[in-house]
Amino acid sequence: MFKNVFDEINKKSNVDKDTIFNIADSIKNANLSDEVVLRKLIKDIAKVANKPVSKELEDKIVKKVKKDGVPKNMKDLF
């Protein structure tokens, strides 16, 4: 089942399984209350996803995560 999920992710976003696991590990071990760490993580994810993140959006994400923690559903960030 997971192989199919990773195949779909790779097909739709061209992000391989190892990259996904590396990001997951970096999130799991990250001190998300540290703004520098959080901003680096946002930039790393944006780079992998090939999606630009404006300074304004980055600021909003940092503020929301520092206030409420990481949401279970990323759509809850906005």
Image (cartoon, rainbow, N blue to C red):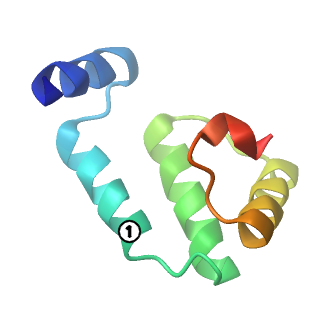
Question: Residue flagged by tag 1: what amino acid is it?
Answer: Lys
- In this orientation, which residue lies closer to the viewer: 37 or 4? 4
Task: Name above or below for residue 53 compared with residue 24.
Answer: above
For residue 77, which quarter of the picture? top right
Q: Is residue 59 left or right of residue 36?
A: right
Q: Is residue 67 left or right of residue 43?
A: right
Quadrant containing the N terminus is top left
Where's residue 62, x and y in %? 75, 64
Q: Which residue is mark 1?
A: 28
Identify the secondary structure beneath mark 1: helix
How many circles with numbers are drawn on the protein? 1
Task: Name above or below for residue 23 compared with residue 28.
Answer: above
Residue at the image position 64 percent from the left and 84 percent from the top: 34
Residue at the image position 62 percent from the left and 41 percent from the top: 74
Where's residue 11, x and y in %? 28, 15
For residue 33, which quarter of the picture? bottom right
Residue at the image position 71 percent from the left and 63 percent from the top: 65
Residue at the image position 79 percent from the left and 47 percent from the top: 54
Quadrant containing the C terminus is top right
Task: Name above or below for residue 48 compared with residue 38.
Answer: above
